[in-house]
Each structure stands twice: as structure tokens, then as C-alpha cells.
Image (cartoon, rainbow, N blue to C red):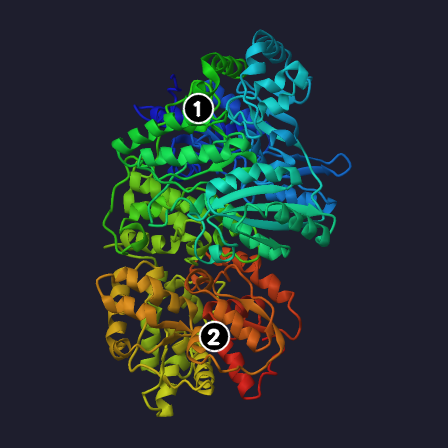
């Protein structure tokens, strides 16, 4: 197959740098939006959520349709291809960079108007699906199509791919919901596409009408009839009996015909109430065979998953079975929705192994998150093996789904492959990630062979190679197997009429690239030497980076159902390079060395990681468990090896050392006085790399360990209280309170002799050699506790998280680190496990404040929630990140982002809290952030309980 010769790689090589520079200059002179041709911007656009990678020359973020036209004109003059890009969540490679990438997410991202009477909305291509739904909600309306990436995918991308989502059995595909599209051709011709084609340029309308007339028979008989036929061009929508719907014909063209600048779409009225029936079946085929029969009940969704995709707590929330159907039904009210779900369960009773009906919206969302995260979780098999898209969404007639799945599983076995199918069973559309070996030529050859055989299997069942996400680079080459050479030739002629210069997204659909070309993993090094052990990735940093498949949950711009942390810096800036995905892409390109060429010395990677708060939110919130905090620490360790570091690394990265020194010299008083004197404080901040806007927090007059020594208590306590540096030197009142509570619970406390530290600040600044030494010293001093297995209670959540996860991964050769990890307990965990019959004092007040991001990501908060409830402390704490994040919020240049992170969830929640609310924050950083930004004093839970035990709980009303 022919493909474009003007790829970014080819244009940028062979002495063409001057031409690229001239292209960038011409764009900058004619486009008002950003024009970015630097390595970082190019690297961020090389990949989408697929297996493919293409390198662009540069990225343009147009401000309006005039900018789009100007960019197209410049590219057309120079014969440079153009690829339109939205959220970059495409799974078949059609949104990978090539030539100049148009990024619509930065500026062309508005809902322009909503007409509730006509039930339509006018949107720009970069608007996120959920933003449209939120704008429509006050009118009692929504946008029907809702792919699992609805919180970050854009309408332009949905129109380009003809996206569908779980509610398509009720509300159809995106093509079913478009009414009018405003587009520009590569040659700059504007067109308004709708039914009848009145807004189409005369030349194009006449030529396409002639093409359709010439091929009436092929167009009337060559397309399979099924609900999810997405592959190829929808030329049958231009048949006269279908009303010549140009908008529908354009939808699904994957940016190969024109560039969308505006869309009018239909809105639907959702039911007033919903209920979710979860039906269990003995195995996957039984669920698949039952799905079509449920359509007669008018469900909103019929989604299927098998047991090999759902495990752990998620599986325990489901009824008995080896596979499940999630069937959502609606009603005029909760009772009607429940009745409809109960009726459906009764109708299915002869086939199912069990059923559950959920009417509580929060419980429904929890189960839907399992389904929506599947596109990420399916990339890691139960044994840790990697699995990839490529055959992500074939579709067959729903009635044939059971038979198709049996043969599909057989084909996997024949090729020695594994995959975890799931998806839209009611529409016959299956998603699956398969453990292709895309790292070696032999594995790629098998990928190609399997792809050809699977295409034939899908066609044999009357199906479509793509049932949702488009053909892209993954399936376009195989379209002749589905449509035959003649109809594919018609597709090529259709493309040529729209884009005779072949300037829009070459290699996709017409004249496609080979499906085994441009795969993104070839060339990556295997197991580069690193400091952390990466136990979940076989010790291979490259495999850790490969975890990011691009589903971009980190690009959610608002609170994730009120529970998520990831990704606070992206929420603050809206920039791709500040998302977890963006940083992973830059690390990927750093390892490849083609676009980002300086390896560990890369300034592009360093700058992108600079605003990573090391919150670890991605470790839990990312569907594939990307741990950017660890990757950042690794990068900083390698980047500054043998070189001077920023001042903040010496000042705040080695904070425990300075705190110990000040305490030993008994200089806390003079230090606090100096911090209150403006000129001295300014000098200290400048020398220490501290943001001038920040106040220097006061040191405790008496460290916790010194207070403990004065108590002259025995050393035989059942619990060792770990005096982390924050508790010991900055907040000893939390330590004293914990002793009071643990004593009341009947748990004797002991404190280690000598300084101990988790190494957190050294880890977060990438001083990993020092962190190892710190960890070994701590292990030496805890030898007795490690030997007798006593719990080690850590009051500071990030320190507990560091001891539980970071230290064992830094010291894989020291079994004491892994042993200590098993003994670490949070304050609430200690009480729950070792004093289960103790009852806290009843405080009976609402709470507000912050769950520490490391607690959310690593430790879990169930024991804390239970302890608060037992004490009558009611209400949730804020999710997200407070924004201070240890040293992050203190470092020069981070203040504005730090404040923006606090304003995302924490500060609004505190402002809205009842007057008598108790402000809780177990993390010292969270308490300090509230003090400095809100002027409010928050306390550790131990402090609140201790004060209640002493009859002093009626302290400050809001803290």
C-alpha cells in the first residue's frame, strides 16, 4: 500500500532543518495561537492511546477557525500533512503526530450554545464530552454517546471516530447524534455538512453525487447491517433513500476528509431515575448469548465483563458468576426504575447465577468505574504480563456474539496469546487487550498474522473490524477483507475528491499504512540501569514507562467523582506536559532518544517533572498504576548525578538533617526569631530556593523525642511510635496526642532511641543514594522492633507510605526493608488492629479538611473513616491534593500551582464547612497549607481524640 512520504521523521532529516524552521516561522507569523516546534511539544504528540507512534514536525493550538484556515494554508503551501487531535485517546493510531498536529483542546473547547427546545447544542471540536453534558444538564438533557473516556475525550475526536459508549443501545452512535458539521478541507474550502448537502461546495457536491450514482449497487449491498459498523467511510449515508446525509457520512472519517471547526449535535432527555441490574452468568459465552435477548426490555446499556478482568474487592461486589452483564434501565422515578430492573432480573432468571440491583447513584458509579477503567486495567494481565490494543473493538451482530467469542478465544489459543474481552455486549462490540509481543520482530510478525486471521473471523460472522474506535493505523490495511477491493477503491476515490493532495492524516483509511509499521515500542532499551527495583515491572524502567497506554484519565479537569487525586498539576495548568500521561510520553521519548535526545540529562523531561507534586495519586487513580512520583525521583537521581542541584534540594531535600542539627544545638528559638524578621527571612528563602510568598514554618521549642525522654517511661510498649521528622521537630503536639490516645486504648508506647527517618524528602528530590543510607540507618536502629514484630505506628501519612513502598523498592537487597513495610501502621490502623474493642470519645461534630494524597494512593483510608465515624466526626474529607506536597509548594516557582491545587477541592470545602466543623488533616503539609492559605488551624485526628479524652474537644469551632 502507498503511504505518505512526508512523515515528520523524513522531513526533519537529511538537511531539512531549515525547511522546518521556515515552516515554524510562517505558522507563527500567521496563526495567533501557539506554534510549538520544540522537542517537548513534538514528543507529547507522537502517540495516542494505541500501539502506534508517528513524529510530528510541530504542534499548533489554533484559537479559532481563522487560525485553522491559516495553519492549513501554510501547510498546504509547503506540502506538509496535517493531523487534527483532541484528547489523544484514540486507540487505533489515527491521532498520532504527523506533519503539523492541530491541538484543539487548548482554545477551541467551548460549548457555544444550547437550544433546549430543539434539543441541540453547538460546540467547538475541542470541548470535552463531559463538559457538554454538564452544560446540557440544567436543561434536563445530555449528549447520548459516552465512551469510557467521556471525562477527557473531545467532541471533535468522537465525531472523527464515530464514538459510541455504553448507552448506544438506547441513544446510538455519534453519527446518530450529529446534525450539522462545519469543516475546512485541506485546500481551505469551507463546507457546512448536513442533510441534503446544501452547504457543500458545488464542485465537491457534484463530484461525490456522481460517485455515489456510479456505485449505487456496491453502496447498497456492500455494507453489513449491524449497530456498530464503524469501519471505512459511511458512503451509504449519501444514498438518495437515506437523504444524502453529509454530516453522517463525514462522521467516522478520522480526520482524513476535512478539519472540523464547529458541530451542531443532538441532545437527549435521560430518564429521571436509573437502576443498575448486574446479572451473573456461569461463563462469558452464556452472558454474550443472553445479551441480545435483553434488548427487548428497552435497556439503556448492556455491558459485559468476564471474571478474568474483575478481581479482588470489585469481584466481591458482584453477584456469583464467571461473567456479568451490567444492564442499566430507567424510569420516571426511583420506584419505576427499580421495578424495571426487577422485571428484567425475573425475565433473565432462568439463565443467571445471581443478580444484584443497585439504585444508589454512588454504588452505581463505583461499579461503572470498574467498566470505565477496563481499557487501562486490561493492559495488565493477572500475572503482570503486558497486553495491548490493536484489536480493541471489533463488532458482530449481537445474536452472533456468543459464537464469535468462542472462536475468538480459540484463535487466541492457536497463536499462544491471551486477552481479556469485555465491552458492549448489547451491540455485539468487544473490547480486548492482547499480550502481543511488540518489542521484537518475531512478536510483530505474529501480531500481523493474528490480525489478518482475526479480520477474516470477524467478517465471517458478518461483523465490522471497528465497532467504535475507528480503523486508524491498526485496521485500515485490512479493509479490503471486509469490503472487497472494489468498495475500498470507492473509498479511495471519495478521499481524493475531498483531499486530492492527500494532506489530511495520510496512512489512515484510504491508501493505508501497514498495520505493523510505526509501532511505538521498537527501539526502546530494555532494563536501563536504575536505582529503584520496579518490582511490578520485572525491574525494568522501560516496562514501567510502558504502563502508560494513553487512556488519559489523568487529564480529567475536575474532581473525579469527588474521590480522585490524579493529576493535580494538570488540573492547575491544563497542559499536557503536566499530566501523568504527558510526563510518561516524555520519558518514553527520552528512552527512545529520537526526539528527546539528551537521555537522563533532558531539560524537556526535567521541566515537565518540575510541576509533578509527587502526590502518588496516579499510583492508585491511574487504571494501570503509573507511579510518576517514583519515576520523577528516579529521573532526578539520574539527571543530577555528579552535578550541582537546585538550592531547594539541599535546603528542603535534606530538611531532616537541618532539623536534627538545629535541635541538637537548641537553636529553635533563634531560628524562629530569624524567620520572623523580614530581611533575614528573605535571605534565607533566596539561599534555600524557597518561594518568597511562603512563610517559614516555626520549629517546635521541644522536639517530641525530647519530650518523650522527659517522661522516663519504660521501653517495653506494645507499639513503637515512629518519630518522623515532621512530627518530631515541627508538630510534636500530634505525637504527644497519639501517646495519650494509644495509652487510653491500652496500648503501651515506646519510641526508638536516636533519630530515625523514612528518607521521604531525599526521595522526592531524587537524592536516592542519601535516601538509601538514611533507610539503612533507620533499619539498624529498629532492629529490635523488626525482630519482635511489633507494629510501627507512623503518624505522618507520606512517611508511612515511604516506609511501606519506597524503602523496599530502594533496598530490594535488604530484607529488613520489606519486613518493616509489613509492620508499618497508620494511627487508625493501629487502633483498629490492636485495640479493636476500644471506643473513642464521642465528639459529635462535622468535619472538613484533607485526606493526604499518599494516604489515598498507598495506605487506604478505610480505618480512618471508621475511626472518625465511631467518634461521631461526620462528613467526608476533601480528595485531591492540598498543593503543598512536602517540599513542592515551598520551592521557588511553584507557589501559583500550589495555590491552584488547594483551590481545586480543599479550600472551597473548608470555606463551605459548617461553623462548628473540626478541621482534620493528618499530613503536616496539609495542615500548614491550610494555615498559610486559609488562616485556619487543622489538627491530626490524634489531637482531636486526645483533646476529647481530656474534655477539651470544644476548642476552636473550626479546627
Residue identified by numbered label 1: 476
Residue found farthest to the front:
350
Pick whichever, 395 or 24, lies toward us. 395
Pick whichever, 161 or 70, lies toward us. 161
**Secondary structure beneath label 2:** helix
Q: Nearer the viewer, mark 2 or mark 1?
A: 1
Residue depicted at 29% across the width and 35% down the height: 522
Q: Is residue 688 above or below residue 32?
A: below
For the residues labelled 2 and 1, the Cα–Cα distance comes to 67 Å
Residue depicted at 52% across the width and 33% down the height: 468
Q: At which x and y percent is residue 338?
A: 68, 52
**Can residue 138 be seen by looking at this rendering?**
yes
Residue identified by numbered label 2: 676
Crowding around mark 1 (Cα neighbors within 10 Å: few <14, some 14 to 19, many 20+) is many
Which comes sooner in the sequence, label 2 or label 1? 1
Q: Quadrant of residue 711?
A: bottom left
> So how many labels did they put on this image?
2
Pick whichever, 698 or 413, lies toward us. 413
**Secondary structure beneath label 1:** helix
Residue found farthest to the right:
117
Residue depicted at 37% across the width and 74% down the height: 724
Q: Quadrant of residue 118?
A: top right
**Can residue 34 be seen by looking at this rendering?**
no
Q: At which x and y percent is residue 654?
A: 33, 67
Q: At which x and y percent is residue 722?
A: 36, 77
Looking at the image, residue 168 sits to the left or right of residue 415; the answer is right
Quadrant containing the C terminus in the rendered view: bottom right
Amino acid at each position: 500500500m502507498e503511504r505518505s512520504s512526508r512523515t515528520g521523521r523524513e522531513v526533519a532529516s537529511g538537511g531539512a532543518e531549515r525547511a522546518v524552521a521556515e515552516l515554524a516561522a510562517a505558522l507563527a507569523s500567521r496563526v495567533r495561537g501557539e506554534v510549538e516546534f520544540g522537542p517537548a511539544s513534538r514528543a507529547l504528540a507522537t502517540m495516542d492511546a494505541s500501539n502506534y507512534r508517528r513524529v510530528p514536525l510541530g504542534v499548533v493550538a489554533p484559537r479559532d477557525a481563522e487560525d485553522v484556515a491559516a495553519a492549513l494554508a501554510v501547510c498546504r503551501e509547503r506540502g506538509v500533512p496535517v493531523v487534527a487531535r483532541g484528547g489523544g485517546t484514540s486507540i487505533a493510531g489515527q491521532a498520532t503526530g504527523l506533519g503539523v498536529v492541530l491541538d484543539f483542546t487548548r482554545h477551541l473547547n467551548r460549548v457555544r450554545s444550547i437550544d433546549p427546545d430543539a434539543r441541540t447544542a453547538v460546540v467547538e471540536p475541542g470541548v470535552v464530552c463531559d463538559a457538554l453534558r454538564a452544560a446540557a444538564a440544567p436543561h434536563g438533557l445530555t449528549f447520548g454517546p459516552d465512551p469510557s473516556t467521556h471525562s477527557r475525550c473531545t467532541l471533535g475526536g468522537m465525531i472523527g471516530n464515530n464514538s459510541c459508549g455504553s448507552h448506544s443501545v438506547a441513544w446510538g452512535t455519534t453519527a446518530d447524534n450529529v446534525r450539522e458539521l462545519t469543516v475546512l478541507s485541506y485546500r481551505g474550502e469551507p463546507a457546512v455538512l448536513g442533510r441534503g448537502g446544501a452547504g457543500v461546495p458545488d464542485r465537491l457536491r457534484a463530484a461525490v453525487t456522481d460517485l455515489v450514482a456510479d456505485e449505487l449497487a456496491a453502496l447498497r449491498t456492500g455494507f453489513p447491517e449491524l449497530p456498530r459498523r464503524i469501519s471505512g467511510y459511511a458512503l451509504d449515508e449519501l444514498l438518495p433513500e437515506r437523504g444524502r446525509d453529509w454530516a453522517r457520512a463525514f462522521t467516522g472519517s478520522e480526520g482524513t476528509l476535512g478539519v472540523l471547526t464547529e458541530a451542531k449535535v443532538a441532545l437527549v432527555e435521560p430518564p429521571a431515575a436509573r437502576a443498575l441490574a448486574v446479572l451473573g452468568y456461569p461463563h462469558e459465552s452464556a452472558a454474550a448469548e443472553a445479551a441480545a435477548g435483553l434488548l427487548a426490555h428497552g435497556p439503556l446499556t448492556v455491558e459485559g465483563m468476564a471474571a478474568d478482568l474483575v478481581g479482588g474487592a470489585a469481584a466481591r461486589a458482584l453477584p456469583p458468576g464467571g461473567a456479568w452483564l451490567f444492564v442499566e434501565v430507567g424510569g420516571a422515578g426511583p420506584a419505576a426504575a427499580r421495578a424495571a430492573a426487577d422485571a428484567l432480573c425475573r425475565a433473565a432468571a432462568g439463565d443467571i447465577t445471581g443478580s444484584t440491583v443497585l439504585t444508589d447513584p454512588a454504588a452505581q458509579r463505583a461499579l461503572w468505574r470498574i467498566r470505565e477503567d477496563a481499557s487501562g486495567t486490561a493492559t495488565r494481565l493477572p500475572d503482570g504480563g503486558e497486553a495491548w490494543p490493536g484489536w480493541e473493538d471489533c463488532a458482530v451482530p449481537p445474536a452472533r456474539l456468543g459464537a464469535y467469542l468462542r472462536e475468538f478465544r480459540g484463535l487466541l489459543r492457536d497463536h499462544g496469546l491471551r486477552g481479556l474481552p469485555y465491552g458492549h455486549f448489547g451491540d455485539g462490540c468487544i473490547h480486548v487487550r492482547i499480550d502481543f509481543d511488540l518489542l521484537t520482530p518475531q512478536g510483530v510478525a505474529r501480531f500481523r498474522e493474528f490480525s489478518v486471521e482475526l479480520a477474516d473471523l470477524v467478517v465471517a460472522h458478518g461483523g465490522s473490524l471497528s465497532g467504535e474506535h475507528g480503523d486508524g493505523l491498526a485496521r485500515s490495511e485490512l479493509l479490503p477483507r471486509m469490503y472487497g477491493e472494489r468498495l475500498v477503491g470507492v473509498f479511495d476515490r471519495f478521499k481524493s475528491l475531498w483531499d486530492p493532495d492527500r494532506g489530511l492524516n495520510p496512512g489512515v483509511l484510504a491508501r493505508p499504512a501497514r498495520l505493523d509499521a510505526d509501532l511505538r515500542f521498537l527501539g526502546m532499551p530494555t532494563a536501563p540501569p536504575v536505582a529503584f527495583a520496579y518490582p511490578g515491572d520485572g525491574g525494568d524502567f522501560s516496562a514501567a514507562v510502558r504502563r502508560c497506554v494513553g487512556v488519559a484519565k489523568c487529564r480529567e479537569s475536575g474532581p473525579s467523582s469527588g474521590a480522585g487525586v490524579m493529576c493535580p498539576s494538570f488540573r492547575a495548568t491544563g497542559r499536557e506536559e503536566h499530566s501523568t500521561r504527558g510526563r510518561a510520553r516524555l520519558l518514553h521519548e527520552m528512552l527512545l532518544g529520537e526526539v528527546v535526545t539528551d537521555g537522563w540529562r533532558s531539560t524537556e523531561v526535567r521541566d515537565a517533572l518540575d510541576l509533578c507534586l509527587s502526590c502518588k495519586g496516579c499510583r492508585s487513580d491511574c487504571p494501570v498504576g503509573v507511579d510518576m512520583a517514583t519515576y520523577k525521583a528516579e529521573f532526578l537521581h539520574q539527571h543530577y548525578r555528579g552535578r550541582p542541584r537546585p538550592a531547594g534540594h539541599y535546603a528542603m531535600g535534606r530538611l531532616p538533617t537541618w532539623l536534627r542539627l538545629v535541635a541538637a544545638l537548641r537553636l529553635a528559638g533563634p531560628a524562629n526569631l530569624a524567620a520572623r524578621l523580614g530581611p533575614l527571612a528573605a535571605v534565607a528563602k533566596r539561599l534555600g530556593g524557597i518561594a518568597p510568598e511562603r512563610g517559614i514554618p516555626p520549629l517546635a521549642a521541644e522536639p517530641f523525642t525530647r519530650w518523650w525522654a522527659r517522661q522516663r517511661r519504660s521501653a517495653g510498649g506494645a507499639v513503637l511510635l515512629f518519630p518522623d521528622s515532621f512530627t518530631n521537630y515541627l508538630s510534636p503536639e500530634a505525637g504527644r496526642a497519639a501517646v495519650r490516645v494509644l495509652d487510653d486504648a491500652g496500648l503501651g508506647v515506646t519510641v526508638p532511641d536516636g533519630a530515625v527517618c523514612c528518607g521521604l524528602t531525599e526521595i522526592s528530590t531524587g537524592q536516592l543514594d542519601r535516601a538509601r543510607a538514611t533507610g539503612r540507618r533507620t533499619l539498624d536502629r529498629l532492629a529490635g522492633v523488626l525482630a519482635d514484630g511489633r507494629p510501627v505506628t507512623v503518624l505522618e501519612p507520606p512517611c508511612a507510605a515511604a516506609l511501606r513502598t519506597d524503602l523496599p523498592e530502594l533496598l530490594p537487597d535488604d530484607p529488613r526493608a520489606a519486613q518493616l513495610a509489613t509492620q508499618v501502621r497508620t494511627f487508625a490502623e493501629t487502633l483498629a488492629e490492636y485495640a479493636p474493642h476500644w471506643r473513642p470519645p464521642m465528639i459529635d461534630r462535622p468535619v472538613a479538611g484533607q485526606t493526604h494524597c499518599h494516604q489515598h494512593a498507598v495506605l487506604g483510608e478505610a480505618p480512618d473513616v471508621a475511626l472518625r465515624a465511631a467518634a461521631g466526626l461526620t462528613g467526608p474529607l476533601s480528595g485531591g491534593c492540598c498543593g503543598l506536597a512536602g517540599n513542592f509548594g515551598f520551592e521557588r516557582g511553584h507557589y501559583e500551582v500550589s495555590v491552584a491545587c488547594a483551590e481545586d477541592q480543599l479550600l472551597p470545602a473548608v470555606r463551605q464547612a459548617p461553623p462548628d466543623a473540626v478541621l482534620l488533616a493528618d499530613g503536616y503539609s496539609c495542615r500548614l497549607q491550610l494555615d498559610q492559605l486559609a488562616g485556619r488551624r487543622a489538627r491530626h485526628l490524634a489531637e482531636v481524640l486526645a483533646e476529647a479524652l481530656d474534655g477539651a474537644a470544644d476548642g476552636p469551632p473550626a479546627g
